Image: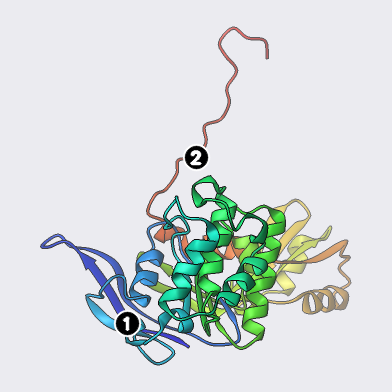
């Protein structure tokens, strides 16, 4: 298990910038936990503190009940990928892994195992400087898995991978969690997190915004909205008036109803003999739920794209 308690990191003196602010969360074994947040949210700083690369200003963290630095053989306890390119470019993939293995008395057979697992066996003798971004990612993941650790922490593991590689990562993470390991994954790809993660820890501007399951997060973000098409929208809206239910007209014959379900709407319409031509529950995507939650936490707001105008004198 990964535990973060009150993690805080400030940089600078009098005008210090707070990168992470009193962050507390747990990552449990047997699940894939997605660690999400906009750029500048403090994700990388948090991961660095978990791995002992940055010292917290306040708070503490443990992995498997100990601080990372307290593990006698950390590669056998925690496998991490923060920067895939942190490899000497003149080394081959095989010798890079062999050097890491030697520091922890990991047998040579394990190097061959992770090379096979990550699909790098055929390029194991090539120098890393010639690797593509995707190959570099696979090598970083191979290094993270080298010690067969109980805890795996990966930062943007699908970066640079082709569709086959993305599917491979998804299946790998799920299989690691199914084995009872603790898996924490940071990613900007919401569509992939929706398919991979079981649990979410979401931060914004260094603070915890959500710590919940994927299903509960999406459900709480508007999954109880129903689109209704009826020739009598005003009458139906009046009969649905109740605490917690909101009805919003979105067209001449269309309503968007929030706070109840399709069964209740359908029964209400039938009771009052109101014809309904469409009754469609609206599902919120993880991406939309994430955007809604973090809208006020985005550090760099992009301007809306300008509309294309017709040049002066040009034919319309």
Of 197 and 21, the residue lying toward us? 197
Question: In this view, which residue lies farthest toward the left?
Answer: 14
The dot on residue 277 is none
Judged from the image, the secondary structure of the residue bearing numbered disc 2 is: loop
Q: What colour scheme has been applied to the protein in the rendered image?
A: rainbow
The x, y position of residue 117, in whole percent, is 66, 69
Q: Quadrant of residue 267?
A: bottom right
Work out how far the residue at label 1 is from the one at label 2, CA to CA, in angstroms: 46 Å
- Residue at image location 10% in from the left, 62% down from the top: 14
Judged from the image, the secondary structure of the residue bearing numbered disc 1 is: helix
Of 215 and 233, the residue lying toward us? 215
Of 255 and 271, the residue lying toward us? 255
- Locate the C terminus and report the quarter of the image it occupies: top right
- Vertical comparison of 302 with 156: above or below: above
Q: Mark 1 and 2 residues: CB-CB less than 8 Å, in contact?
A: no
Of 26 and 251, the residue lying toward us? 26
- Residue at image location 18% in from the left, 62% down from the top: 16
**Which residue lies under the disc numbered 2?**
304
The dot on residue 69 is 1
Which mark lies nearer to you, 1 or 2? 1
Question: In this view, which residue lies farthest toward the top?
Answer: 313
The x, y position of residue 164, in whole percent, is 72, 57
- In the image, is 113 to the left or to the right of 1? right
Q: Decide: few, some or many residues near mark 1? Use Cα within 10 Å; few <14, some 14-19, many ≥20.
A: some
């Amino acid at each position: 298990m990964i535990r973060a308690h009150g993690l805080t990191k400030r940089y600078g003196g009098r005008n210090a910038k707070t990168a992470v602010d009193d962050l507390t969360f747990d990552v449990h074994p047997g699940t894939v936990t997605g660690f999400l947040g906009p750029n500048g949210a403090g994700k990388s700083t948090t991961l660095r503190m978990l791995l002992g690369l940055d010292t917290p200003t306040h708070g503490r963290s443990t992995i498997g009940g100990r601080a990372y630095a307290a593990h006698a053989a950390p590669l056998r306890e925690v496998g991490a990928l923060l920067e895939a390119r942190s490899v000497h470019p003149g080394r081959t993939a095989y010798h890079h892994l062999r050097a890491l293995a030697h520091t922890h008395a990991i047998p040579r057979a394990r190097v061959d195992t992770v090379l096979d697992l990550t699909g790098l066996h055929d390029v194991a003798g090539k120098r890393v400087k010639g690797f593509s971004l995707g190959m570099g990612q696979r090598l970083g993941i191979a290094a993270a898995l080298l010690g067969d650790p109980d805890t795996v922490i990966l930062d943007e593991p699908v970066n640079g991978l082709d569709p086959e590689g993305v599917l491979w990562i998804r299946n790998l993470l799920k299989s690691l969690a199914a084995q009872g390991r603790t898996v924490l994954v940071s990613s900007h790809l919401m569509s992939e997190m929706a398919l991979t993660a079981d649990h979410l820890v979401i931060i914004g501007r260094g603070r915890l915004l959500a710590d919940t399951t994927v299903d509960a997060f999406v459900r709480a973000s508007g999954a109880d909205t129903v689109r209704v098409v009826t020739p009598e929208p005003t009458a139906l809206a009046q009969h649905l008036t109740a605490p917690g239910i909101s009805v919003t007209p979105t067209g001449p014959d269309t309503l968007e109803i929030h706070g109840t379900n399709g069964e209740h709407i359908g029964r209400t319409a039938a009771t009052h003999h109101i014809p309904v031509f469409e009754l469609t529950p609206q599902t919120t995507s993880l991406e939309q739920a994430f955007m809604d939650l973090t809208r006020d936490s985005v550090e760099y707001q992009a301007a809306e794209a300008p509309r294309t105008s017709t040049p002066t004198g040009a034919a319309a």
